Image (cartoon, rainbow, N blue to C red):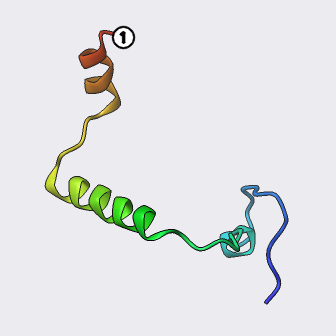
Amino acid sequence: MDLNTRTFSRSACSRSKNIGIDPVPLSQKTIQRIEEAKKDIRDGNVYTLKELKAELGLE
């Protein structure tokens, strides 16, 4: 299987042709953190950008 080494660009053609493949597999810790983040999103434990800016006093 050849790796896609072209740079990503958005165009009218199929997006599947523009997907890069990382030859290094994800670590178990990274996979676990992704699953935890997905659970947080499902449970609603997230901030909008507006809420985060207000929380940090940036708005």
Instruction: Locate the C terminus and report the quarter of the image it occupies.
Output: top left
Quadrant in the rendering for residue 30: bottom left
Q: Is residue 47 above or below residue 4?
A: above
Comparing 12 with 27, the one in front is 27
Residue at point 28% right, 59% down? 36
Bin the neighbour count of mark 1 within 10 Å (Cα to Cα): few under 14, some 14-19, many 20 and up: few
Residue furthest left as drawn: 43
Quadrant in the rendering for residue 6: bottom right
Instruction: Give coordinates of residue 56: x percent, y percent.
Output: 30, 15
Instruction: Give coordinates of residue 57: x percent, y percent.
Output: 30, 9
Q: Secondary structure at mark 1?
A: loop
Residue at point 17% right, 49% down? 44
Residue linked to disc 1:
58
Comparing 37 with 58, the one in front is 37
Instruction: Give coordinates of residue 54: x percent, y percent.
Output: 26, 16
Instruction: Locate the N terminus and report the quarter of the image it occupies.
Output: bottom right
Residue furthest bottom as drawn: 1
Comparing 30 with 41, the one in front is 30
Total marks drawn? 1
Q: Indicate left or right for 52 with 13 as reference.
A: left
Q: Is residue 59 above or below residue 14?
A: above
Residue at point 25% right, 54% down? 41
Residue at point 73% right, 63% down? 12
Q: Indicate left or right for 37 with 4 as reference.
A: left
Q: Which amino acid does the dot numbered 1 rest on? A: Leu
Q: Is residue 6 above or below residue 41?
A: below
